[in-house]
Amino acid sequence: MSEISSPRGQELLQYLPGYYSRIKEFQQLYDSEGVEFDDLVEATNSNLDQIFVDTATWGLSRWEKELAIKPPAGQPFEQRRSTIRSKMRGTGMITIKLIRSVAEAFHGGEIDVSTHPELYRVTIKFIDSVGIPPNLDDLKNVLRDIIPAHLDVVYTFSYLLINEIHGMVTLSDLEAIPLKKFAGGA
């Protein structure tokens, strides 16, 4: 019976003839090597995670440096990932489809893009979200980088109206809805 606490140490010891598992020095050796292998596997998996935007954490700064993005201090990982994904999509000929793709990658929801050439304007409308998205400023920066400078960009949002929820929610449900989701809310 071995006294190895590391699962990888147990696994390593199984590759040796059975009598080694009863020798205390081998148990200690493979226990310590098992811990080191655990650390190596964890470090390898962590490095692998940094290769992909959707799983990167400490590696996001490398993505941002490569794409010339300067995130605000303390910005959540998911917002940083959205900025990176949208910046990666925002290359090539500028079309409504490209603008929609970039905005949807950033927002994570459905976006409607309409152009008004006579007004030199592009309108971005958030379809399936209520209120102002938390990372709107980042989205504005990314879209400003890809939309030609002579075009104005207008953002439209959906808000809850009292008559839309009247009779549908209780007072306690209503208290749980942030004020910014209502028209005129702060």
Image (cartoon, grey):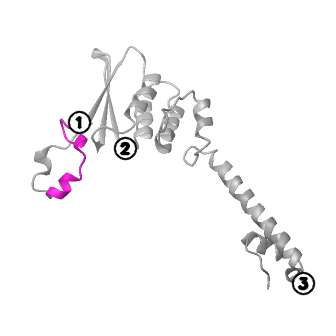
Secondary structure beneath dot 3 equals helix
Q: Nearer the viewer, residue 115 or 127?
A: 127
Residue 177 left/right relative to 112: left
Badge 3: residue crowd in 10 Å (few <14, some 14–19, many ≥20): few
Q: Which mark is residue 6?
A: none
Q: Are marks 1 and 3 in contact (CB under 8 Å)?
A: no
Secondary element at tag 1: loop
- First in residue order: circle 1 vs circle 3: 3
Residue at 14% in and 48% down: 164
Give how far across and how far down residue 10 sits, in percent. Answer: 77, 75
Q: Which residues are magenta?
A: 171-186
Q: Name the residue beneath numbered marker 2.
A: 109
Residue at position x 68%, y 48% in the image: 47
Toward which corner of the image does residue 149 lie, by quadrant?
top left
Q: As shown in the figure, which amino acid type bears the numbered disc 1? A: Ala
Residue named by callout 1: 186
How far apart marks 2 and 3 lie (CA) works out to: 61 Å
| Picture disc at residue 19 | 3
Which comes sooner in the sequence, label 1 or label 2? 2
Dot in front, 2 or 3: 3
* Residue 183 is inside the magenta segment: yes
